[in-house]
Amino acid sequence: MNSPGLPFGRAFNRRDFVRHLGAGFGGVALRQLLAAETVRIDPVAAGHRPHHQPRAKRVIQLFMNGGASQMDLFDHKPELFRRAGQSFDPGAGVRIEAPTSEPGKVLKPPVPLRQHGQSGRWVSDLLPNIAQCVDEMAFLMAMQSKTNVHGPGSYLMNTGSLLPGFPAFGAWVSYALGSESDNLPAFVVLPDTKGLPYNQRGNFSAGFLPVSHQGTLIQAGQASPMADLNPPSSARFVTPDANQEGLALVQKWNRQHLESHDRDARLEGRIQAYELAARMQLSAPEVFALDGETEPTRRLYGLDRKETQDFGRRCLMARRLVERGVRFVQVWSGAGGPTGNWDNHANMAKELPPMCAATDLPIAGLLRDLKARGLLDDTLILWNTEFGRMPFAQSSEGRDHNGGTFVGWMAGAGVRPGVAYGQSDEWSWKAAHDITTTYDFHATALQLLGLDHERLNVLHLGANRRLTDVHGEVIRAVLA
């Protein structure tokens, strides 16, 4: 059988078939693993240069999946308490609509919000530990989304586009700045142990960037956090010597395959990703071993409490990852689906408290731990969600989606502490002034990382694509 497309000759015999198959799958070989000496990656030497002096070297993004309710957490509106139970009427004959329900009566928060810190920021009683950290934070009080649908909203906050197929925020940062570690990926994702968020892996895709920049998933709740990091115990034939010989052989096939395809960037990216996977066999187990942390540190993150153990473990793992050179870590709270996340349609008083209880102590612990270790000075912490909730009830006690206004905050490297930017209307229904779009948010975060969002672009299908599309302004008011 002849096949002119085969890179290793025209004869399609058994040997060529095996060789072609192995090269096509990509393999897991790498040159550095076989070398006697490991060289730390220097982003500048590798061609990764910021556009200006960065304030932040790395990012930890805490993403509240489902649409965390702004007026129940951070956006105090006395009008909701005064008019609770009344018909919602903003005046001027405005038509009131809700995405998935009929608008109900004005719904007040289930628990009070109080002022905290020298900045006097309002925080729900459901977040007592975060409330003690508000003077470290800059709040974006009038964020706004183009949509109130989970899938597009999550894509927009994570990739800058309402549509699938675009690179995630972390992928752009990886592409622009590279990794500070030779043995760990630049972009790591720690999803909720209950499952992946809306859009599944689309939220952390590399899109049209090389696949090596996609988010690497760490399943923190499993005995083996990374799938296939090591061979199964039943594979006793995989000895260290056999493994090294296999790596060398597949590396040779990979490179031959790459050369025969005009050095296709997609193949190069795949090879780099598999090479990194091999390096992680040596480095990752130590990162995941939390038993080396002191008991006070474990308590700081809530690892001694059932309700905070899961999210706390992942926040602690995020700190260990950035300590070891990971550039961008994303920690998710809430899986996709109708329950067990921040999508509180049915009953705010029952559904919101457990989400707050699971995340409040670990987030405050992360901030305090980073500050104590001197890492907060050059680590950017982001707290985000895809959109907010409505000021009126859905059914009788829940809230529907609202892209009109929501809240996010940032802390750490280059952030002006204790400030707030923007304001919603008296109901927390619509953003009123100093609005922050998702594009503005991304532009501001990139600015802190030393990147000009207008210059960070890639030519794709004839268009210069960027994280902020053709929009975005840096919010200078929240920069130190």
Image: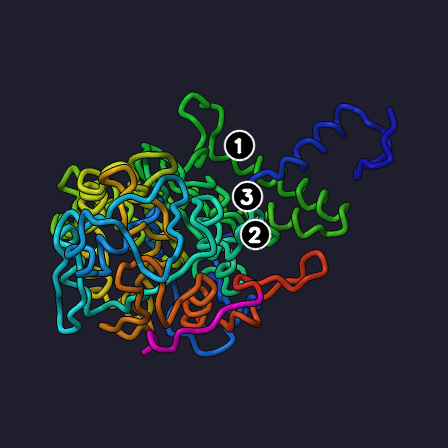
Q: Position of residue 259 (x, y in %)?
A: 74, 48
27 lies above or below 446: above
Q: How much space separates mark 1 and mark 3, taking CA atoms?
A: 18 Å
| Front label number (2 vs 1) | 2
Q: Position of residue 366 (x, y in %)?
A: 23, 56
Q: Quadrant of the C terminus?
A: bottom left
- The range drawn in magenta is 470-480
Q: Residue at x 71, y 50 (%)?
A: 264
Question: Disc 3 designates what residue?
Answer: 274
The answer to whether mark 3 and mark 2 are in CB contact below 8 A is no
Label 3 crowd (10 A; few <14 / some 14-19 / many >=20): some
Q: Is residue 183 visible?
A: no
Q: Is residue 233 visible?
A: yes
**Looking at this view, is 240 or 27 the one in front?**
27
Q: Earlier in the sequence, mark 3 or mark 2?
A: 2
Kind of residue at disc 1 = Ala
Residue 13: which numbered mark, if any?
none
**Looking at this view, is 204 or 249 the one in front?**
204
Q: Which quadrant of the figure has residue 217?
A: top left
Question: Disc 2 designates what residue?
Answer: 166
Q: How much space separates mark 3 and mark 2, taking CA atoms?
A: 22 Å
Question: Disc 1 designates what residue?
Answer: 242
Q: Would you say residue 369 sits in the magenta stretch?
A: no
Kind of residue at disc 2 = Phe
Q: Is residue 295 left or right of residue 187?
A: left
Q: Position of residue 378 (x, y in %)?
A: 33, 69
Q: Residue at x 32, y 66 (%)?
A: 140
Q: Chief secondary structure of the magenta span?
A: loop
**Looking at this view, is 244 or 165 the one in front?**
165
